Image (cartoon, rainbow, N blue to C red):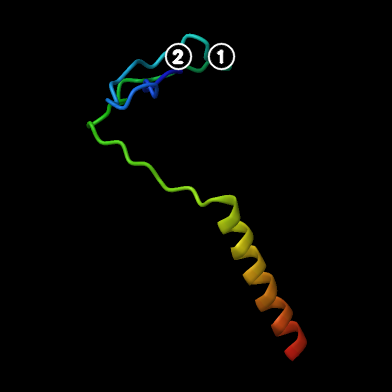
Amino acid sequence: FALFSWGSSDGSFSSIDFSGLQLAAGTRLDTSRLYLDGTVSVQAVPEPATWALMLAGAGLVALRRRRQD
């Protein structure tokens, strides 16, 4: 479904389309409590290099602990 139009920076609300959603037999989709209050928060995603450095650091700590034992 298309929630926002990311082609522009105005952040205008586009639409939510559930027409292609397939539900199991005997179930239904209740959107009566689906709402937006005008606030959208975005979480920062670490870069792959950050993950690599973090894993390398954890590996070095583990190696050092192993050698001390």
Q: Residue 60: name its quadrant.
A: bottom right
Report the residue at 28% width, 21% height from top. Answer: 12
* For residue 24, side relative to residue 40 (left or right): right
Mark count: 2
- Name above or below for residue 63 compared with residue 22: below
Q: Amino acid at mark 1?
A: Gln
Observer-nearest of 37 and 23: 37
Report the residue at 69% width, 71% height from top. Answer: 59
Q: Residues within 10 Å of mark 2 (few under 14, many from 20)?
A: few
Which quarter of the rendered picture does the C terminus lie within? bottom right
- Name above or below for residue 17 compared with residue 69: above
Badge nearest the viewer, 1 or 2: 2
Q: Residue 49: name its quadrant.
A: bottom right
Report the residue at 75% width, 83% height from top. Answer: 66
| Element class at badge 1 | loop
In three-dimensional space, the C-alpha distance between marks 1 and 2, rounded to whole angstroms, equals 9 Å
| Place of residue 33 in the rendered image (x, y in percent of width and height, measured from the top left) | 30, 26
Report the residue at 47% width, 9% height from top. Answer: 19
| Element class at badge 2 | loop
* For residue 68, side relative to residue 16 (left or right): right
The residue sitting at the left extreme is 37
| Place of residue 6 in the rendered image (x, y in percent of width and height, measured from the top left) | 39, 24
Q: Which residue is mark 2?
A: 18
Mark 1–mark 2 contact, CB under 8 Å? no
Q: Which mark is residue 63?
A: none
Observer-nearest of 7 and 22: 7
* For residue 31, side relative to residue 29 (left or right): left
Q: Amino acid at mark 2?
A: Phe
Q: Which residue is mark 1?
A: 22
| Place of residue 46 in the rendered image (x, y in percent of width and height, measured from the top left) | 51, 52
